[in-house]
Image (cartoon, helix red, strand yellow):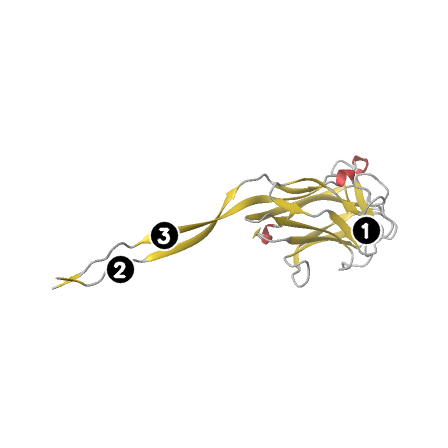
Amino acid sequence: MKPMSTMFLLVALASTFATVVSAAVVVDYDITNANANISNVVGIASEDANVTPTTMQSFGALGGPFDFLGSFCYLGWPVGGALDPAKYYQFEITPDVGFGVTYASIDFAAASGGNEVELISWEIHASTDGFAGSDIPLGGNTFPANSTWHAFSLDISALGQQAGTITFRFYMYDATSTGFTGVGQAPTFGDQGRNFTVNGTVEELVVQTAVVSWGRLKAERR
C-alpha cells in the first residue's frame, strides 16, 4: 500500500459583523443655545462616544440673522422655487476607526415668519466625499410660514451603515423676503421646537478570521 497524498486545506474566512455599543442619538446639535445673530455656528449638546462630529455652520450669503436665543434663522434663503447650492447649513459625522454608523433619522423643527399663505421648502442632502462628486438627496418637505415651529423626522436609513465621514447639508427655499427662516427650539414660537438630532446606531466593526481544516486525507492504492 502506498500513501497517495496528504492534503490540508486551510480556508480563511474573513467576515465583518457588528456589536451594538451605543444609544439612538448619534449627535445632538444645541439649537437651544443657538443665536444666528451672535454666531453662524451651532455647538454640540451631546454625541456618541465613538463618533467625531463637526459643529453645524451656515454657508453662503444668508443675510439678516435672527437675533433670538434658541433659533438658527436667516433672511437670505432663496425666494424662488429651487434651492441654492451655495446656501446651506453643513455638518459632518465621522465614526472612530473600527466603528460604523447605521443612520436612521434626522429630527428638527423649522419655522418662518409670514402670513400662513407661503409654503417654505427644505431639503437634506448627504455626501461621502464632501460634495466633491457625491450628492445624495435624502428628502424634504414644506411647512407654512406662520412663525410657529413645525417638527419633522426625516428617514435617512437609505444611507445604511457608513464607516467613513458623511457630510450633511440642510437647504431651505421658497422663503419670504421678510420672514426669518430656519430651525429652532425657543418655546416662544410653539411647543414643537427642538434640537437638531441625528439618530442611528454606532457599532463596532469586528473582523473575525475562521480557519477551517478539511483534515488529513489519505488514500491508498493497491
Residue at the spot of label 2: 7
Residue at the spot of label 3: 211
The type of residue carrying mark 3 is Val
Q: CA distance from mark 3 to mark 1?
A: 64 Å
Q: Quadrant of the C terminus?
A: bottom left
Q: Which mark is residue 118?
A: 1
Find residue 171 and report its image quarter: bottom right
Q: Is residue 70 above or below residue 63?
A: above
Badge 3 crowding class, 10 Å Cα cut-off, few under 14, some 14 to 19, many 20 or more, is few
| Residue plotted at (60% across, 40% down) | 24
Say left or right for 206 vs 145.
Answer: left
Task: Residue 4 in the image: state x and y as whole percent.
Answer: 19, 63
The type of residue carrying mark 2 is Met
**Mark 2 vs mark 1: which is more N-terminal?**
2
Task: Residue 56 in the image: state x and y as whole percent.
Answer: 73, 48
| Residue plotted at (36% across, 52% down) | 211
Q: CA distance from mark 2 to mark 1?
A: 77 Å
| Residue plotted at (79% across, 39% down) | 70
Question: Are dots 2 and 1 in contact, CB under 8 Å?
Answer: no
Q: Is residue 100 above or below residue 190?
A: below
Badge 1 crowding class, 10 Å Cα cut-off, few under 14, some 14 to 19, many 20 or more, is some
For marks 3 and 1, give the one nearer the viewer: 3
For marks 2 and 1, give the one nearer the viewer: 2
Q: Secondary structure at mark 3?
A: strand
**Mark 3 vs mark 1: which is more N-terminal?**
1
Q: Which mark is residue 86?
A: none
Q: Secondary structure at mark 1?
A: loop
Task: Residue 43 in the image: state x and y as whole percent.
Answer: 74, 42
Task: Residue 92 in the image: state x and y as whole percent.
Answer: 68, 51
